[in-house]
Amino acid sequence: MDATIADAAKSALKDASRFVFFNEQGVIASSFTVDASELKGLQALYNDRDEAIRHGMNVLGTRYEVHRYHPPLVYGRTMGGVPEQSEGIALCRVEAKGGQSVYGLITYQMPNISARMVPLLQKFCQDHLEGK
């Protein structure tokens, strides 16, 4: 695990409930224990827009509906229950040195919304993962 990225994420993404940064080899930094099969599913989101929207994102066994599919960003929210108690999710893909994809994912609780959290994630990924 990369402590430098984890520490930077704790500061820059302090309003996120969880974060994980990963590539095809596995987790780079994370604030929670990640299921490797869920990481593969997250990577596959970029293969097909319709499939991503149909199947959503799954993290820690929770399904998040995909509301926006704008690669390099995919994001959405849990559904059902009280909207103010839903949880948001955002996934960002950037290219590291050598052309390998690196992914950053955050979840966030209300009152944090996608309009604020998605740009924070994208900037973090560009500053700390892209080209490295």
Image (cartoon, rainbow, N blue to C red):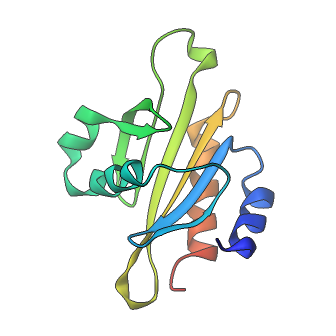
Q: Residue at x 55, y 34 (%)?
A: 88
The N terminus lies in quadrant: bottom right
Relative to 79, is 44 above or below?
below
The C terminus lies in quadrant: bottom right
Q: Residue at x 56, y 39 (%)?
A: 114
Please give left or right for residue 16 compared with residue 33 in the image.
right
| 80 and 6: which is toward the camera | 6
Residue 69, image x and y in percent?
A: 33, 46
| 59 and 10: which is toward the camera | 59
Please give left or right for residue 109 compared with residue 104 in the image.
right
Residue 31, image x and y in percent?
A: 68, 52
Residue 19, image x and y in percent?
A: 62, 52
Q: Residue at x 63, y 16 (%)?
A: 84
Q: Toward which corner of the image does residue 93 lie, by quadrant? A: bottom left
Q: Toward which corner of the image does residue 10 lie, by quadrant? A: bottom right
Relative to 96, is 38 above or below?
above
Please give left or right for residue 71 compared with residue 61 in the image.
left
Q: Residue at x 64, y 49 (%)?
A: 32
